[in-house]
Image (spheres, rainbow, N blue to C red):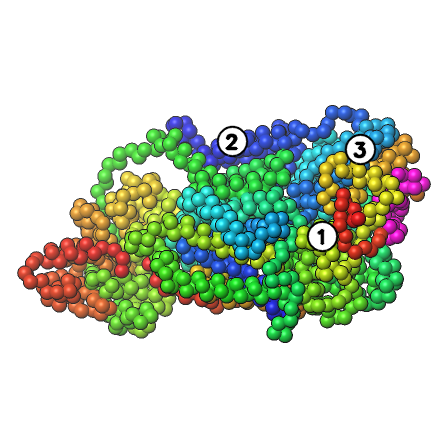
Amino acid sequence: MTLIWGGLALGAVYALVAVGYNIVYISSKTFNFAQAQLMMVGAFLAYTALVSWNLTTPVVVLVAAAVVAGVAALEQVVAVNPVRDPHNILVTTLGAAILIDGFVQLQWGSQPLAVPFFAGDDAVTFAGGRVYPVELFLIILAVVVVVALTLLSRRTMTGLALLAMAEDREAAQLRGVNVRLMAFGAFVVAGVLAGTVGVFVGPKTYAISTLGASLALKGFVVLAIGGFGSLPGTLVGGLIVGLAEACAVRYLGSEYAHLTVFLILVAVLLARPSGLFVRVRERVV
Amino acid sequence: MGLLGRIPGWAVPVAIGVLVLLLPQVIGDFSLIRQVQLGLILALIVSGLNLSLGYAGELAIGQAAMYAAGAYTAGLLSLRGHTEILLHLLIAGAVALVVGTVTGIPGLRLGSWSLAMTSFFLVLLIPDVIAVFREQTGGRNGLSGILPPTLFGRPLTPDDYYLVIVVVTGLWFAVMRNIVVSRHGTALRVLKQSPVLAASMGISVFRMKLLAYALGAIPAGLAGALFANLDLYVSPEAFSFSLATTALAASILGGSASVYGALVGAFIMQFGLNQAGGFERYSLLVTGAFLILGGVALTGGLSSLAHTLWRRIAAPATVPERVERVQAPDMPDLRGEKLKVAGVAKAFGGNQALDTVGLIAEPGQVTALIGPNGSGKTTLLNMICGFYRADAGTITLGAKNLEGRAPHAVARSGVARTFQTPNIPPGITVLDAVMSGRFATHSASVLEAVLRLPRYRRVRRDDFAEARRMLDLVGLRHLEASEAVALPLGQRRLLEVARSLVAGPGLLLLDEVASGLDEDEAAGLADVIRKVRDAGGTVVLVEHNFQLVLSLADHIVVLAQGRVIAEGTPDMIERDPRVMSEYLGTVPDDSASPIVLGDLVDDAVGEE
Amino acid sequence: MRLRMTAATGVFALAAAMVGCGSADGAGGDDDAYHVVVLGGLSSEGILADNASTSVNAAQAGVDFANDNGGVVGRKVTIDVIDDTGDPTVAVSKLREAIAENKPDLVLNSGPSTVAEATLPILNQNQILSFNIGPTVNSSDPKKFPLNFDIAAGADQQIAAYQDHFEEKGYGKIAILHGNSAYGETFGSTAEDLLTKSGVEVTVREEYDVAALDMTSQLQKLEASEPDAVIVDAYGAPLGYILKGVGKLGWDVPLIGNTSVSSTSLTGAAAPEGIVGTPEAKSLVMQVPSAAKRDPAAKAVNEAVERMLKHGEIKSSMVLAMNYDALPLVMAAAESADSIEAADLAKALENPKVLERASTALYDDYGFSSDVHKPQDVSREYQFIAPSVLKDGQFQ
């Protein structure tokens, strides 16, 4: 059970990265490579605010969310909005990711920094396994975020507009949806999410300048398994990847962790080319 | 201008190649030589990436894995005492080809994002795979003890080896150029423009993509062998994610859809980033900023920028001279075949798009398919072409059963089509665009294309002749050297018709071929269609322009709500009250002329 | 297409110009000087950068020491720093460039071992004396690389120190947990071999991915094998994940870290930045060379620390200050051989008397011989200490 909790917690982190990818993907059919890096910035801000400035957790969350949203907005304006060729967006957001890596390394150095968690850092026994409070919190956070976003997108006008854009950008534009504003807004929302989540990922993984790179690809895989654009898919994808990784390491050896995840990815994609939660549409012309 | 224009296209690259070859004699500076070597090796990787990204339109960065495969192959060969560099290149290229093919199949089967993802992951797996085989590969500690390379048993000095790298790179770029300017290059552009278009031209999307991806593995494998013999040491770090992203950035910067852009991009990355002396602390910042700037400012890469500039400078020289309009020749005989659609049904979810539809189109006749929006015309067309699978019913062309075949197989059995919005890839001439219609039906292999073997030359000669004949027919011959996408809509439609006819199809499907055309253009188009009919072709016309249909069709089939509600000669259809009511929703009060009907339908151009 | 190539030529020329600029700032000049080059991954990604900084700092301090004490047989010593970014390919490029410009008399390799693997053949080919911190399989073999000396103790010496520690504590069953870095792999397999040979039972040897974010799975595997103690190789965040994992499992087992563990900043700082004084750190001891433990009586070491501080902050511990000793070794060897030729110096460095005379700070006697070019019998110079506050490269 300890193994499962550990796998789930990490899976939740991957899923939260994938949710960030999805928000941007749904709104503008682009892929923000720097999403995991934004989360990393959140973790470092949490360290500075909690340890150096001695702020309380709610204030820290606000600060991190606001600052990271700002970074994401800047990214959108500088590296995404002016790009015309969609291929290039992958490159420019990759550039943004590397830029953030470099900045973080200059600003916070390259050693791991421990980020405290508000509910304490002592492991507890829960449902037959040992687990840190922060790990439980991350699992709950992932579920809450996904449920809340799903409800929001179905119940509010903004959400509906987003879904409309995902279905058909031009049609949405014709019906008065401000596509540019929505795309910008999506980055900001993804930034708020990354900043908030970063505050709680830090206590699990430390604030470390290679965190973004570690999370980015796993988030990508979760997205592929769950399906591009599917919010519930990210939860299931995170669950699968997190557990598969933990079990592969435990029973096969650490060099098989990536291989196992890769095989699952290929298997899922072969069975369901657009992921578990997205249906292939037949219309082509 | 004229002088510049007369230099053959390959002269400049060859001259620069010779220059690079002589570089050590000219400048003895060691570090420059070293950077050039690494730059060339990177250029090989980028060139492979360009084949799949720029030409086939698939984002895949698995080249790093093939590079690793090449490097380890060469290293392991050397450790076993085989130091012959030609052997290394041959086997490394082959191993990379195998790795590319095997890893490409699952990703390509699924298409864009999946391939990107599996290839990203492939790069992540490199160190793991190396670790699993650490007995052979040395694991994380790398493979050391590689012996210096030999050529025909003669040891190579560093200067000799420099020449080897330059020559191998030069040869690859010659091969690359030959592929790109060959019919395969055009076919790849077609594929990148639209897989649907490619399939309907008889190109197997999957096989073509695999071809590009697998071919792109070869230079990466060569690069790996060259690298292993350069440093005589291989470690997993050399094949990291950052190599993959560097190659990607180089590809984008240089221009993915260009042959020599790979060199430009690779050299910028190699010199610009690795040589930012004193800036190492800020190297991540510089790299990141560089990627953003490059991606934002350079759509289409530096080569596209250069191309545009060149046009500005050299454009006056290439203005087409006025060509006398030749009298369009008569259509050669077309062996049209009888299309028979019987009892076809198709539902999307709960929506019955087609319900037991039957249709017969005879050779030497124009059969028109009309109906209001959403009546299922385009669905039926897509079903004939093999894009949708019918729930029930049969579709046959002559003696061949089309039902259940993949789109490219349908096209190969003689079905050619045009699109509502002309679908023409950018970057190719009118002549190339027409010739591409023959790619699938009259084939020559990549190897034949690369080596320009006799069969390739013969097929190519026929391509030219046939394409020119079709251009004469549709009256576009004088524009054969213009860029195809730059033509006005009417001419692009004619171009599509020419492209469809060039392979001598048994069935020609024209989808909304007159929409957006003015009267003259529509009349010209009607002339062409009549010629096709008179030459014995089978023509199916899906059309909104009722006037055109009435004047052109021999037989009209009317669809409404997925059913055939009427069929017959234009006279019969024009007077059929049921057609009127279905078309307009109500029976017109005043017995207005059919022209009103036609006009109303015209307004509803567009998507179904 | 033509213009594309024209553009390429332009870029090419531009790049050539950049290379010209880049290479203009070599040390050069004083032909009479003893010329040292130190390679270090100052801008490598992640935590390795701090190590490189300490190594380079130590080399610079060593050069100061030499110049303050009469130089190398009277010659002034100059030093060039090459940032190899920890990447073997870059290291080869820059080293070759340096050799072409102004052939160094001595090269100090700050690791990692992949850089050593890539550069040693070049150094050998150019007959350049070198000291190396990142040991490889052959780097200390005089038959393969007669002019190279591994200046950092190999895994064998460190493990020998472990054996003494185990005997003292009465541990008979040991599990090993190590990273999949080049050093981690070597350390792990060497530890397993040597311990098994010496009669210690190795219950399980487990590897982890240095980029992983959770170690619970590996630790569960170790726990299941019921060892008396666990040898841990970890550097940076993975150490934190291991400690967290052990805490989570509630597993009460002594963890014995290697020098990588003691080079991690977490072990040198109090909470919240580090783990000093936290419950997680209670079961952890780690191996350090004596030089990394503050001792007011150790004059030579303290002098080294002072000299290093003049070149900037010591970012990681004195574990990585081995480059400092390269200069005293060369001075003694040059004096004995009355030469600065690489071959003569290498021969002199195999002489026990020369080594004894060298005023080295970190190890008293490096024990090089004509059979093996790495520190011998230095296991007694190691201690096992609990995490404590690190100041100026030393645990207080």
Residue drawn 78% across and 43% down?
Answer: C321
- Residue B169 at x, y = what percent? 57, 42
Asked if residue A253 is positioned above or below residue B223 in the image, the reply reads: below
Query: Badge 1, how many Cα within 10 Å: few under 14, some, many 20+?
Result: some
Tally of numbered tags: 3
Q: Which residue is mark 3?
A: C64
The answer to whether one can see residue B83 in this image is: no
Q: Is residue C173 left or right of residue C352?
A: left
Q: Which residue is mark 1?
A: C270
Q: Secondary structure at mark 1?
A: loop
- Residue C249 at x, y = what percent? 69, 68
Frontmost residue, B570 versus C32: C32
On the same chain: label 1 and label 2? yes
**Subunit that carries the residue with mark 2:** C
N-terminal-most mark, 1 or 2: 2
**Subunit that carries the residue with mark 1:** C
Q: Secondary structure at mark 2?
A: helix
Q: Which residue is mark 2?
A: C10
Q: Mark 3 belongs to which amino acid?
A: Asp
Q: Is residue A35 left or right of residue B225?
A: left
Q: Mark 1 belongs to which amino acid?
A: Ala
